[in-house]
Amino acid sequence: MPSIRKLLLIGLPLLACLNLVSAHATERPLDTQALKGVAQGKALFDINLSELEKLPLYLQVIEMTHDGLTAQGTAPDFVIAFRGASVQFIHGQDGHNPARQKIASQIQRLKARGVRMEACSIATELFGVDNSQLLPGIEPVGNTFISLIGYQSQGYSSIVIM
């Protein structure tokens, strides 16, 4: 059995290295050049995913993007448009599924940050989703293709997630 002294001699330097790597891993480069002179980041996230497991990751990245813009002094103005098969993952039914619980939590956090979220009523009808069952914070719209046209005409950058 190794002595306590040996464990300390090996363990403390290893712990220090892990802390250094961990601290370095959380530091991200800035987007100074891209954001030069940009006061507001207008983004339209066009989500059309057909796999439930992918949505939490993309919502997390959208949240990180919102926080990253804020941290760099640019006001985020985000819209998330759910269309196609993705509308199947944003309703309150089957709330015991861990992925759906995570999605509901992420939607609440994004809503609290002021992110506007929409669901295509054409898609909800085609996929049998009742608009009254959409998660709180997600508003049904007539047609997200029309939304996409309107938001892009207002200067929102379209980011397609498929």
Image (cartoon, rainbow, N blue to C red):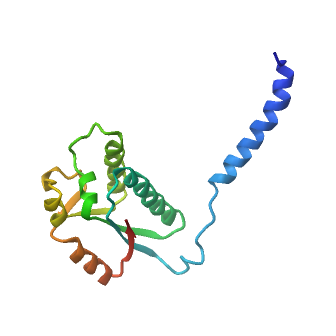
Q: Which quadrant of the structure image shows residue 14?
A: top right
Residue 16, given in percent of the width and then of the height, sits at 77, 40
Q: Report the residue at 42% width, 68% height from top.
A: 76
Q: Is residue 66 left or right of residue 122?
A: right
The residue closer to the viewer here, 21 or 51, is 51
Residue 111, compared with residue 120, is above or below; it is above
Residue at image coords 44%, 62%: 66
Is residue 1 placed above or below 21 in the rendered structure? above
In the picture, the quarter occupied by the N terminus is top right
Residue 113: x and y in percent read: 37, 57
Q: Residue furthest top?
A: 1
Q: Position of residue 52 (x, y in %)?
A: 34, 51
Q: Residue at x 32, y 42 (%)?
A: 101
Q: Quadrant of the C terminus?
A: bottom left
Name the residue at 30% across, 84% down.
153
Q: How many marks?
A: 0
Q: Position of residue 98 (x, y in %)?
A: 35, 39
Q: Is residue 116 left or right of residue 25?
A: left
Nearer the observer, 151 or 55: 55
Q: Is residue 14 above or below residue 77?
A: above
